[in-house]
Image (cartoon, grey):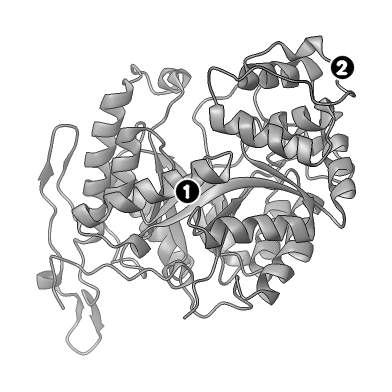
Amino acid sequence: MKRQMHLGLFLLGTGSHIAGWRMPGAVDSFQDIEAVCEIARTAERAKFDLIFMGDNLNADPAAHPSYTARLEPLTLLSAVAMATERVGLGATVSTTYSDPFTVARAFASLDHISHGRAAWNAVTTAAPAAAANFGTQHPDHARRYEIAGEFLDTVKGLWDCWADDAIVADRESGLYIDPARVKPLDHEGAFFKVKGPVNIGRAPQGHPIISQAGGSEPGQQLAARTADLVFAVVQDIDEARAGYQALKARLPALGRRPEDVCVLPGVMPVVGRTDREARDKLNALMRHVNASNALGMLSERFGVDMSAYDLDGPIPELPKADTYHSFTGVMLAKARRESMTLRDLYNLVAAARGHWVLCGSAESVADTLQDWFETGAADGFNVMPPYFHEGFTDFTDLVVPLLQERGLFRADYEGTTLRDHLGLQRPANPNFPA
């Protein structure tokens, strides 16, 4: 079969643009379950592989509104599972401030509720402020990844405590669970001591999908060893290719194949019927952003105080930045190629707080995604709409049909589980060989 693109939706109810909720008609609350269900149904109509929710464990009123006022992800996705049939359902849960037994049980439950559509985004919480909500000290980076490695192994072990056929439910004999087909885990490690088994039968997918997004060396190694799906944070195609190839190169030494891990760079698409229409949409969004904050981000990226230049003038000749070499080179080349003003450029950089922004006509957006997909930069994309619903339906109604016409993306689901969508094998159970 021809290799096909995978599409995830990064679900923030108020949009990935920091000011997206201020657009006329935009969803302005991530606590509105009906709005979230409608977003999920739109993703399913467009045949997305999954929707994915990030999370955080502390509230900062000055932060993005969807990170501060939101429903708990697993609770929300259990409701969304009832409003959808095929689209995968991914949620972030921290390995730093959770326990393996609860996480194993919760995601196995979501997998059963959704009939095999659950995904766990396993993160090591980076924000030290979260520690105050758990009465503890925030571990350093190295220790967080040590904890995460043992945490993931423990959760997978708990999922494998049950054989697929352990629940007999034989009315004649009165045997409900075959005790020979359930085993304790008896895990005792540096950070966790867990007897097991977890009190729910083996998940429909065997293991719910595991995703990660760590970019550090420990994060990349953990992803290569344990993840099915990797969300990459990149800015240009050369950077993306290098990261993609580096991650795939780690897999054989861990007994895994390149196709066992799907890499999805995050992208905030701003789509129009023409490039100018798309840029006007982005400019409308950016009018709601504090200009000093945007210029500060641009100055930091380029290593130059950009406030000295005319925002509505041409791109100035800038010295080569001491950091972000590939980013500045690609962005400046794009700006000059498209005759952008400095305001256009800072809108592109500041719009998604440093995430890759792809602004243009549906054709140009589809062309760019195709180029990344076909030249070894991605297995698909984690789509981060600037706001809902229009900022997302611009992509589903204009770009997805082009990808389908080109044979790059499915016209319909061929399976029922998230593993089916991603083309990933169901893991064997080492405790109960077939």
Quarter of the picture holding the C terminus: bottom left
**Residue plotted at (75% across, 44% down):** 387
The answer to whether residue 149 is above or below residue 304 is below
Residue 402 picture location, percent across and down: 72, 69
Q: CA distance from mark 1 to mark 2?
A: 35 Å
The kind of residue tagged 2 is Asp
The kind of residue tagged 1 is Arg
The answer to whether residue 109 is above or below residue 243 is below
Mark earlier in primary sequence (1, 2): 1
**Residue plotted at (83% across, 36% down):** 285
Tally the marks. Answer: 2
| Residue 257 picture quarter | bottom left
SS for dot 2: loop
Residue closer to the observer: 294 or 179: 294
Residue 114 picture location, percent across and down: 49, 66
Dot 1: within a 10 Å radius of its alpha carbon, few (fewer than 14), some, or many (20 or more) residues?
some
The residue that label 2 is drawn on is: 310
Name the side, left or right, on which 100 lies relative to 211.
Answer: left
SS for dot 1: helix
Residue 197 picture location, percent across and down: 19, 56
Whether residue 354 is visible here, answered yes or no, is: no
